[in-house]
Amino acid sequence: MASWGGAEENELDSRNQQRSFALAGKVSTLRSLALDIENEAYEHNRLLDGMGNDFTSSDSLMGGSINRVKNILTSGRQNRKVMCYMAGFIILFIFMVWFFSSRIFSGQ
């Protein structure tokens, strides 16, 4: 069995140290990436929770509006006249939005 010389052992030891330092640098980089991903995921979850609360409040607002429209529809003959005016206004409004948006996007 051959014995290792002092120079060869020192060379192998220095190579191992260089590789261990390179590995430590890569591990440090991976750790910082993992922490960045964790922070990004935390921020996204916080944003999604806020959006969930916003959608819940808009759902209750829409529910109240729908209930008011139902009350108008079921309250009698005089309110039917108001509903016809409202429907006409909505149709006119949609037509005006379409007309002006088509003029804006066509470049005139």
Image (tube, rainbow, N blue to C red):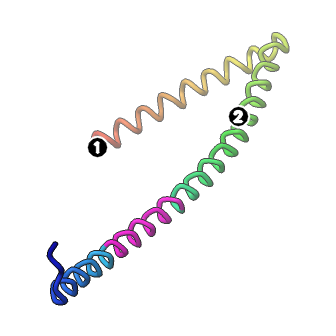
| Cβ atoms at labels 2 and 1 below 8 Å apart | no
Residue 42, horizontal then vertical, whole percent? 58, 57
Q: Is residue 28 magenta?
A: yes
* Residue density around tag 2, few if under 14, some if 14–19, many if 20 or more, within 10 Å: few
Magenta segment, prevailing SS (helix, strand or loop): helix
| Residue found 16% across the figure and 72% down from its top | 1
As drawn, is 75 to the left or to the right of 80?
right
- Label 1 sits on what residue type? Gln
* Furthest-front residue in this view: 1
36 or 13, which is in the foreground? 13
Residue on which the image places disc 2 = 59
The mark that comes first in sequence, 2 or 1, is 2
As drawn, is 28 to the left or to the right of 107?
right
For the record, the magenta segment spans 23-38
- As drawn, 4 above or below 33: below
| Residue found 28% across the figure and 43% down from its top | 108
Residue 72, horizontal then vertical, whole percent? 79, 20
Residue on which the image places disc 1 = 108
Q: How many marks?
A: 2
Mark 2 → mark 1, Cα distance in angstroms: 39 Å
* Furthest-right residue in this view: 75
The quarter of the displayed image where residue 18 is located = bottom left
- As drawn, 22 above or below 71: below
